[in-house]
Amino acid sequence: MEKLLQDNNLKITKIRIAILEELLKLNVSITAEELFEIISKLQNVNLSTIYRNLKILVENNLILKVTEINGETYYRYNKQEHIHHLICTNCHEVLPLEDCPIHDLEHKLELKTGYNIVSHSLEFRGLCPKCKEKTRLK
Ligand SMILES: [Zn+2]
Ligand SMILES: [Zn+2]
C-alpha cells in the first residue's frame, strides 16, 4: 500500500494504509461509517478524518465511490484491472465477471464515430441469489 500511495504522489499515512488494506480485505462495498467502526478499533481516528481521506483516495482513483438509490454512499477498493462487476443492491456483494462483453462494441463505436476509445466502465446491479431467496420467503 505504501507504494500505491507513493506512485500516486500521496503522503503515506497510517490511516490511508488502514483504509486501503481494510477495503481490499473486505471485497464488498461499505459505508464510511462502517469503515470507521472497523478502523477505530485498530487506531485512534475520528469519522471526519475517515471522510477526508476517503475523498482523497477517491479523487486519486484508488477507491471507488458509489451512491445507491437509497442515498447511502458506499466505498470499495479499486483493483484497477480491466474487470466488470455484478453488484448486489441488497447485501452489496461484489462479483467480478470473467470477461468483458463490450470490446466488440468498442470497436464498432470507434469505426462509427472516429473516436479512439481508451477506456470504459460498466457495472451490473441486481439481487444476488441469496438475497433473492430471502425476499421470496418474506
Ligand atoms: Zn445480496
Ligand atoms: Zn470491459
Image (cartoon, rainbow, N blue to C red):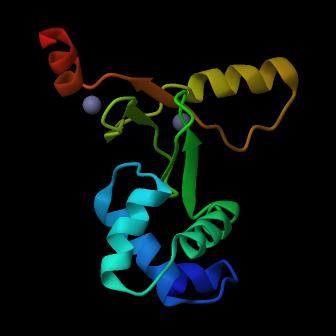
Residue at the outermost right position = 114
Q: Position of residue 40 (x, y in %)?
A: 37, 77
Question: Dividing the image into 4 quarters, which one contains the C terminus?
Answer: top left
Indicate which quadrant contains ligand 2: top right
How many numbered discs? Answer: 0
- The residue shown at (41%, 51%) is 30
Residue at the outermost left position = 137
In terms of image quadrants, where is residue 7?
bottom right
Q: Answer left or right for 86 relative to 67.
A: left
Above or below, 112 relative to 84:
above
Q: Position of residue 108 (x, y in %)?
A: 70, 19
Q: Is residue 78 visible?
A: no
Depth check: 37 or 75 in front? 37
In terms of image quadrants, where is residue 22?
bottom left
Above or below, 23 relative to 53:
above
Above or below, 18 relative to 11:
above
Depth check: 89 or 33 in front? 33
Q: Answer left or right for 58 relative to 19.
A: right
Q: Position of residue 63 (x, y in %)?
A: 54, 60
